[in-house]
Image (spheres, rainbow, N blue to C red):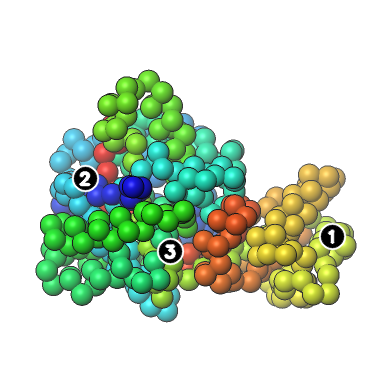
């Protein structure tokens, strides 16, 4: 009988301090909008905050990953030494997050890294949704390898049309202790969390056991690269352990938020492409030749802050269309004398603003029907990198709960 890959965890939450200051958005958001992170930096400068324990990717060109990792790990140790945390032993946290257009319900717990494999042809119970880019792992590994704590922005998905795992907890909030309820900074909406233990925890575990019999238990939604970094470090650690030591080592697990793909609050948003520093006329002509067909999937081209044309792109599947677009952009950038840089933008308004700069071209991608996710992963393997995200940029998971990994 297969075991659930998602299990209770010993979860840490700050017992003191302003929770709005404590909780900041995922490090891979607003990567080309330094003003967002500069505001967060000023706000959290002298506050108890997860900001000091992460590596915002907007700053990767300014500070070495080693320097930022040392800063983050030192902040974690200060929090532990100061005793700011309350520990919830063998628990889940039920989360209700107000996002654009509704409420997203989730469950924070531990994912067994031994059940997870991010390789494209994986047959593991837990699989990546998108192709992992090897050079994106070292900065994340640098923070985690000496970190006493982990903070998740990872969101993982179950295929639960009967809504048997997460959703029943909504009707049981009166019987659970409320842990937090506050407004997230920078327009992130409101979030509330309840302590899941006892009878409620047992009910969740029974439902997870039923899902464990499926070919794929869990698909990673957000945070593919952070989870892959945790997996790589666990493989290194496990190599020096006995089977008994490996079975109980805290680094075997990663703290994540689990969501049902059928939750109305789960909406798959496209991740758009923006290309900087190119001859726009030459670039677009090449893209038309490589991509355009009469009956392809429609994307929109943006120049000068405005949508200038629609392009139909070849591809038998949603992932195939993105694969062709991505490879064509990368080939042009690699071979062009003009250079060029590519970034991945979650928000349409942000992309429109960025393309106001001369020599910049944006591609607005369509949304994917979320019912395609598990079918595609089982049949065709991973999607290309940066194919979709869950929700708008400000709807991404904020760092909140922690867990010891040493």
**Image point (73%, 59%), residue name:** 325
Vertical position of residue 338 compared to residue 344: above or below: above
Q: Secondary structure at mark 2?
A: strand
In which quadrant is the C terminus drawn?
top left
Q: Secondary structure at mark 3?
A: loop
Q: Which residue is mark 1?
A: 290
Q: Which badge, 3 or 1, is on the more N-terminal residue?
A: 3
Vertical position of residue 316 compared to residue 38: above or below: below
- Give the class, few, some or many, for how many residues have Cα within 10 Å of label 1's Cα (few <14, many ≥20): some
Q: Are marks 2 and 3 in contact (CB under 8 Å)?
A: no
Vertical position of residue 398 compared to residue 349: above or below: above
**Number of residue marks:** 3
Q: Residue 316's spot in the image, x, y percent?
A: 72, 65
Q: Which residue is mark 2?
A: 10
Question: How far separated are the C-alphas under marks 3 and 1?
Answer: 36 Å
Question: How far separated are the C-alphas under marks 1 and 2?
Answer: 51 Å
| 18 with respect to 1 (left or right) | left
Q: Is residue 306 visible?
A: yes
| 319 with respect to 146 (left or right) | right
**Image point (36%, 58%), residue name:** 211
Displayed quadrant of residue 363? bottom right
Q: Which residue is mark 3?
A: 159
Displayed quadrant of residue 376? bottom right
- For this orientation, the residue located farthest to the bottom is 101
Residue 266, numbered circle: none
Question: How far separated are the C-alphas under marks 2 and 3?
Answer: 25 Å
Of the two numbered discs 2 and 3 in the rendering, the one whose residue sits closer to the viewer: 3
Q: Secondary structure at mark 1?
A: helix
Q: Which badge, 1 or 2, is on the more N-terminal residue?
A: 2
Q: Residue 179's spot in the image, x, y percent?
A: 18, 61
Q: Are marks 3 and 1 in contact (CB under 8 Å)?
A: no
Q: Residue 395's spot in the image, x, y percent?
A: 43, 66
């Amino acid at each position: 009988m297969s075991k659930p890959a998602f299990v209770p965890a010993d979860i840490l939450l700050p017992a003191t301090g302003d929770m709005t200051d404590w909780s900041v958005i995922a490090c891979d958001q607003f990567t080309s909008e330094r003003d967002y992170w500069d505001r967060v930096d000023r706000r959290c400068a002298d506050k108890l905050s997860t900001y000091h324990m992460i590596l915002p990717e907007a700053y990767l060109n300014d500070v070495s990953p080693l320097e930022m990792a040392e800063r983050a790990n030192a902040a974690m140790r200060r929090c532990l030494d100061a005793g700011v945390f309350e520990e919830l032993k063998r628990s889940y946290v039920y989360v209700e997050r107000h996002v654009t257009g509704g409420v997203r319900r989730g469950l924070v717990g531990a994912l067994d890294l031994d059940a997870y494999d991010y390789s494209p042809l994986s047959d593991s119970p837990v699989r990546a949704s998108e192709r992992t880019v090897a050079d994106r792992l070292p900065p994340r590994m640098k923070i985690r390898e000496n970190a006493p704590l982990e903070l998740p922005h990872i969101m993982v998905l179950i295929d639960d049309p009967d809504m048997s795992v997460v959703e029943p907890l909504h009707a049981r909030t009166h019987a659970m202790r409320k842990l937090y309820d506050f407004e997230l900074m920078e327009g992130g909406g409101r979030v509330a969390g309840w302590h899941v233990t006892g009878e409620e925890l047992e009910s969740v575990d029974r439902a997870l056991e039923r899902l464990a019999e499926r070919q794929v238990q869990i698909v990673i939604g957000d945070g593919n690269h952070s989870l892959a970094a945790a997996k790589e470090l666990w493989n290194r650690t496990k190599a020096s352990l006995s089977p008994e030591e490996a079975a109980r080592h805290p680094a075997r697990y990663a703290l994540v938020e689990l969501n049902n793909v059928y939750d109305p609050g789960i909406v798959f948003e496209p991740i758009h492409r923006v290309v900087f520093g190119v001859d726009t006329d030459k670039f677009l002509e090449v893209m038309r030749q490589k991509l355009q067909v009469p009956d392809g999937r429609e994307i929109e081209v943006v120049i000068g802050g405005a949508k200038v044309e629609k392009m139909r792109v070849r591809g038998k599947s949603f992932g195939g269309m993105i694969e062709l677009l991505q490879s064509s952009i990368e080939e042009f950038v690699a071979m062009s004398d003009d250079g060029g840089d590519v970034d991945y933008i979650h928000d349409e308004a942000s992309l429109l603003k960025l393309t106001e700069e001369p020599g910049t071209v944006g591609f607005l991608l369509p949304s994917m029907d979320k019912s395609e996710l598990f079918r595609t992963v089982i049949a065709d393997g991973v999607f290309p990198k940066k194919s979709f995200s869950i929700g708008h940029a400000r709807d991404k998971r904020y760092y909140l709960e922690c867990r010891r990994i040493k």
